[in-house]
Amino acid sequence: MLDLKNLSSEINLKIQQVKDRETLESLKTLYLGKKGIITEAFKSMGKIDADNRKNFASELNIIKSNLLDQINSYQSKIELKEIEEKLNSEEIDITLPTKEIKKGKIHPVSQVIDELTCIFAEIGFSVAEGPDIENEFNNFTALNTPEHHPARDMHDTFYLDENKKTLLRTHTSPVQIRTMLNNKPPIKIIAPGRTYRCDSDMTHTPMFHQLEGLHIDKDINMGHLKGCLDFFLKKFFEDENLEMRFRPSHFPFTEPSVEVDISYKLENNKIVVGKGDRWLEVLGCGMVHPNVLKNVKIDPKKFQGYAFGVGIDRLAMLKYGITDLRSFFEGDLRWSNHYGFDANDVPTNYRGLSK
Ligand code: DAH
């Protein structure tokens, strides 16, 4: 018959030697496995005489349940230890650099278009649009541009067919024609957009941006034009002292036609727009030619108006000190990060509309 006292002290000894999951498992198998010492002892109880059997069984049960208790408590200790070891080895390294979050920037051209849209909205202009691919009529003929005009020359214009009927618009002025053909006066619109000419150097790119302005109503005169441009230029350059002057010029679609210069000075070889004794040409404008009005079936005796066209990229260069126009369209991220605008940090009050 198995000596239970011996068994009990042997178990106690073995339990103290348990170090890890493996030694615990083999202890379990040794005593409680299918052929384990305790399992076998229970099986062979039949051989014990009836008087001792009861005692033996209850003692063996106590030893078994003690052993199970011990095994359970060791098991949880080992699990805790394992978790601790895992936590220690998988420690988070807070000194590691975080992943860089890349934020896009608003291109100066988009920024300037937003600024101009807001400025002109204040004095009642809405935004009109037209396609980049235009027909010859809207781009030239309707704008009173005769066949022999240099603007029609192959070198300036990207024609899209041999008959020179379709082209990439060379200016935003065809939006004037589209708007007047589709709307009755009064008309007061600006049309910002892409324009194309076969030209490339520091200050010219084959694709560039213009903003067209058109105001048609009864009794509109050059005074209205000057007042409008004065308001826009002072607001845009954020300078109440900015001076402007009209200089006689020629455009086929306006009569009279003028070019507008603004005052500036040079500081460390840099252009500073505002007060100064130098003049810088910024835009072309004039009173809409009666022929243009006739071409769009507006009676020039009843309605008059002014129009203007300004280079958006040039305005951006002047206001934000960018010297090379070609860099605008190279898509260099370093350039965008330097000259671009943060969507949450627009420098002026334009994005939320103005005061
Ligand atoms: N379309 C002209 C250009 O591209 C600019 C211009 C001048 C537009 C006078 C106008 C204007 O509306 O009246 O050079």
Image (cartoon, rainbow, N blue to C red):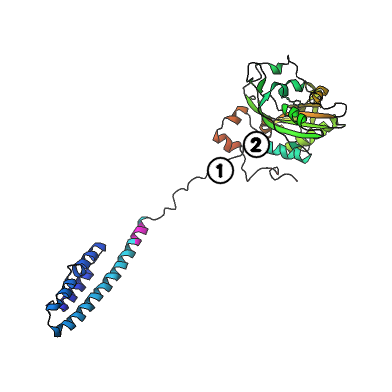
In the picture provided, is 186 more to the left or to the right than 11? Answer: right
Please give the residue where the numbered disc 2 appears in the rendered image. 110
User: The disc labelled 1 sits on which kind of residue?
Assistant: Lys
Q: Secondary structure at mark 1?
A: loop
Q: Is residue 87 above or below residue 350?
A: below
Look at the image and say whether residue 87 sits in the magenta stretch: yes
Quarter of the view holding residue 353: top right
Please tell me the numbered disc located at residue 302: none
Check the picture and name the quadrant holding the N terminus. Answer: bottom left
Residue sitting nearer the eye, 346 or 46: 46
Q: Nearer the viewer, residue 336 or 279?
A: 336
Upstream in the sequence, badge 2 or badge 1? 1
Residue 240 location (% of width, % of height): 78, 38
Viewer-proximal residue among 337 and 154: 154
Looking at the rendering, the stretch of residues picked out in magenta corresponds to 83-88
Image point (20%, 78%), residue name: 60
Question: Is residue 46 toward the left or the right of residue 110 in the image?
Answer: left
Is the shortest distance between ligand 1 and the CB of mark 2 under 8 Å?
A: no
Instruction: Specify whether residue 24 is in view.
Output: yes
Does residue 154 sit above or below 171 in this rendering? above
Near mark 2 (Cα within 10 A), the count class, few <14, some 14-19 or many ≥20, is: some
Q: Is residue 15 left or right of residue 123?
A: left
Residue 269 highlighted magenta (yes or no): no
Q: Is residue 174 above or below residue 72?
A: above
Q: Which residue is mark 1?
A: 103
